Image (spheres, coloured by chain):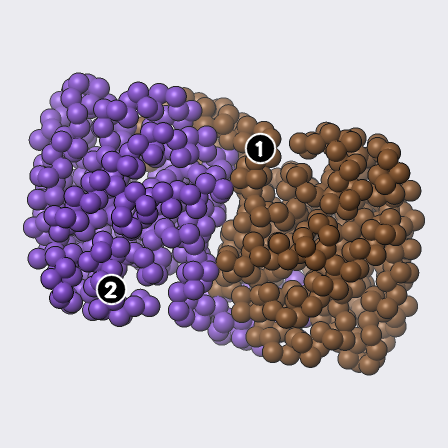
Chain colours: A brown, B purple
């Protein structure tokens, strides 16, 4: 039985009990959220050593870090190191988006070593090393089955990308920027057929069911720039995703919805409300959102602004964005910077939403600060090493810091 | 005549014409905003070479970068370099908060070299090298006069800090964290007298008037942690500042109001509304606000989140926060990181507020992105050098980047 079926049968699973421990709800309350489809526990029954977590309404905001090789840089060792850093700084899940090297082996190893849920985008693999015309519908569906069977906890499937998106996206300034969305549209155009991920959705549900893989319905039509935010093709896809989410829940499959992208600050609340309404309260998983297009090199900051506001208004799950977004594959330090920025956004939103005890660490920090208790402060820091290095750099012996020196307000 | 007096007399000054050029309003509209006290042009008539800018309602959000030596590190050369970097990356004003070395000479040189408005906090100097008990009321007022005469465009004066703040601030977790606020409370406690900046406010107005120095009414009682946000002592001071702002306007003196500090996301809009209401629509100058206390080393990010939201809700002027906040005096790189984060926040807010043409640069960037026109993209970047370095690092020869490689959505 999937977590959703278990919850619907009125039973509390071991995973619900474990996940509830770190939440402001108890296991029974979590069961009710899962039953309604307002929360999910992505936990493939083949993923050994997983510490289950829940994502959804009223729970702590979760963050995801994307990992993955590229054809130019395919080192399993580096990806495992990235995963270690991501989890150390607070990633609640990781996604393996590898498209270089032996992707099956890399995925297997990441799942084996990961204590947090692992997500993937199976369709990338179907297109690797092939021309669009060489990829069959079965290849696409087959990649999903393969990923489910390899122990992936949640899969992004762009089932809402349909033929209709082609004319609707023509007026866009930024075009189609989702890798999955773009591949599917090219497949549709090449084959002059509807997307097999849309026409074979029931079969995808079946594949997900066996091992309780959570479906993350991808937003292949997410806006890639501010001008395209909340446009007709994005909303068209969202309405389809809402219907697909309902079918998933009815089939006992846990489902979350992916969202933008590039969104101006003033449209973020509206985007969250639209998603919650269209998708029956399914958890919302946003990429950023980035609140300006002009800051490559700093998109961890532009997305922390958008992510904090999105989570405050009800987004449940933030995909990190690293400083290297739009420019190159992230390195180890980019992963760290991305996770920390995203964690700050999630934490700030949890405080603002009134999640019980969300501010406790802040209050402990503030008490240490008032007493100029540096050891105590470092103990409460999101990144104690960086804070310590700043303190050390100033070579000050006394208790105050070099900003105010003897004019320290707290002395 | 001050800008406010000129505006009230129905005249458009040269400074209004110059400042309006970069705004979505014309000179006459700007004159009306200044007349109402909803906008200011900080421009000391002794500051040669200043390019005037306006701060206030309906105008582009401005950002300030704090400079200044400390007793442990007092290099004029470094501060001038910091100013250059700050202006290069978009600081609209700088504040010289020097408390080390020859502060008069440093200030004079910064004003001489700065094309942007320069602000200071005169009272620091009155306390330098002295015990609290050695500082007279005349010393405090004298420091303001000295700074005005030296050509400073706006001065922070903590005139709203009164005796009453002492009992009101006792229940705080974070105490009093404003350097100026804390010094004044100590002076009040030591002298058992009301603050001379409060009792001699009319005299301060006179000093500001001669050279048209804009008063920035400091928030000495700003919260230093989330728990203290929007508390009674902060609001008590804000009400006083509202009355003082009115007296300034009535005397023909331009005035802006300083604000917090550490504020949870859900209280930011309320803080802006309270300020605008209490202070008759005077421009609001916020420090951050920081939306969590646990991220020293990353407070440029925590404050970019808060600053973007504050500006979106109507704050007019953001004081940057650097990664070294709470830890040490910023170095050159911290200044750069701080300015860029603050600029991102201001820019994102301007787009969200619907400032005409605010999104033009984003749209140009997005058009270049869609065409994989890297040269064009670098031309629209907030920091082209950093973006270029990321691109170069990936050693890719083809047009796509290493994130998606051949699966590039845009190719």
Q: Residue at x 16, y 46 (%)?
A: B248
Q: Residues within 10 Å of mark 2 (few under 14, many from 20)?
A: many
| Residue B142, position as x, y percentages in the image | 9, 36
CA neighbours of label 1 inside 10 A, class few (<14), some (14 to 19), many (20+): some
The mark total stands at 2
Q: Is residue B254 left or right of residue A265?
A: left
For the C terminus of chain B, the quadrant is bottom right
Q: Which of the pair A4/B368 is nearer the observer?
A: A4
Q: Residue at x 37, y 40 (%)?
A: B260
For label 2, the SS is helix
For this view, does B259 lie left or right of residue B149?
right
Residue at 82%, 71% in the rendered image: A195
* Figure check: B199 above or below B75: above
> Closer to the camera, A376 or A206?
A206
Tell which tag, 1 or 2, sits nearer the viewer: 2
- Residue A213: in sight, yes or no? yes
Q: Nearer the viewer, residue B38 or B158?
A: B38
The image's mark for residue B327 is none
**Rendered image: mark on residue A358:** 1
Q: Point out the image quarter for the N terminus of chain B.
A: bottom left
Position of B373 relative to A282 (above/below): below
- Quarter of the figure with residue A155: bottom right
User: Left or right: A47 with respect to A332?
Assistant: right
User: Which residue is the site of mark 2?
Assistant: B30
Q: Is residue B341 something one can see in this rendering?
A: no
Output the chain of dot 2: B
Callouts 1 and 2 in the same chain? no
Tell me where residue B80 appears, x and y as whole percent.
26, 51
Instruction: From the top left corner, tell me how far across and down residue A370 is, in percent.
Output: 40, 24
Residue at the (88%, 70%) spot, across then down:
A137
């Amino acid at each position: 039985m999937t977590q959703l079926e278990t919850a619907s049968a009125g039973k509390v699973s071991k995973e619900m009990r474990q996940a509830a421990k770190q939440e402001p709800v108890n296991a029974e309350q979590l069961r009710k959220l899962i039953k309604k489809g307002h929360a999910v526990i992505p936990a493939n029954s083949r993923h050994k050593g997983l510490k289950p977590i829940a994502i959804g309404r009223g729970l702590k905001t979760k963050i995801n870090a994307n990992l993955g090789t590229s054809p130019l840089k395919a080192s399993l060792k580096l990806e495992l190191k990235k995963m270690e850093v991501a989890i150390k700084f607070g990633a609640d899940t990781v996604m393996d988006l590898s498209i270089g090297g032996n992707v099956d082996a890399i995925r297997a190893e990441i799942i084996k070593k990961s204590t947090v849920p692992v997500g993937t985008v199976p369709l990338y693999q179907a297109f690797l090393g092939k021309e669009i015309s060489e990829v069959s519908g079965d290849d696409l569906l087959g990649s999903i089955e393969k990923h489910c069977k390899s122990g992936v906890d949640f899969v992004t499937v762009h089932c809402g990308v349909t033929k209709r998106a082609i004319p609707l996206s023509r007026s866009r300034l930024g075009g189609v920027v989702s890798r999955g969305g773009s591949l599917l549209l090219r497949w549709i155009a090449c084959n002059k057929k509807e997307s097999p991920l849309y026409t074979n959705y029931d079969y995808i549900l079946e594949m997900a069911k066996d091992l309780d893989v959570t479906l993350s319905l991808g937003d292949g039509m997410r806006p890639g720039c501010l001008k395209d935010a909340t446009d007709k093709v994005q909303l068209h896809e969202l309405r389809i995703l809402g219907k697909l989410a309902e079918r998933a829940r009815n089939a006992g499959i846990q489902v979350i919805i992916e969202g933008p992208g590039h969104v101006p600050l003033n449209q973020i609340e509206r985007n969250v409300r639209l998603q919650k309404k269209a998708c029956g309260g399914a958890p919302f998983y946003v990429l950023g959102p980035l609140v300006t297009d002009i800051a490559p090199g700093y998109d961890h900051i532009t997305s922390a602004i958008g992510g904090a506001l999105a989570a405050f208004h009800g987004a449940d799950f933030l995909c990190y964005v690293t400083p290297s977004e739009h420019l190159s594959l992230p390195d180890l330090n980019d992963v760290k910077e991305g996770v920390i920025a995203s964690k700050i956004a999630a934490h700030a939103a949890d405080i603002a939403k009134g999640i019980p005890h969300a501010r406790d660490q802040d209050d402990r920090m503030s008490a240490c600060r008032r007493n100029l208790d540096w050891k105590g402060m470092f103990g409460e820091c999101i990144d104690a090493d960086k804070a310590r290095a700043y303190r050390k750099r100033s070579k000050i012996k006394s208790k105050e810091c070099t900003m105010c020196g003897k004019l320290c307000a707290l002395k």
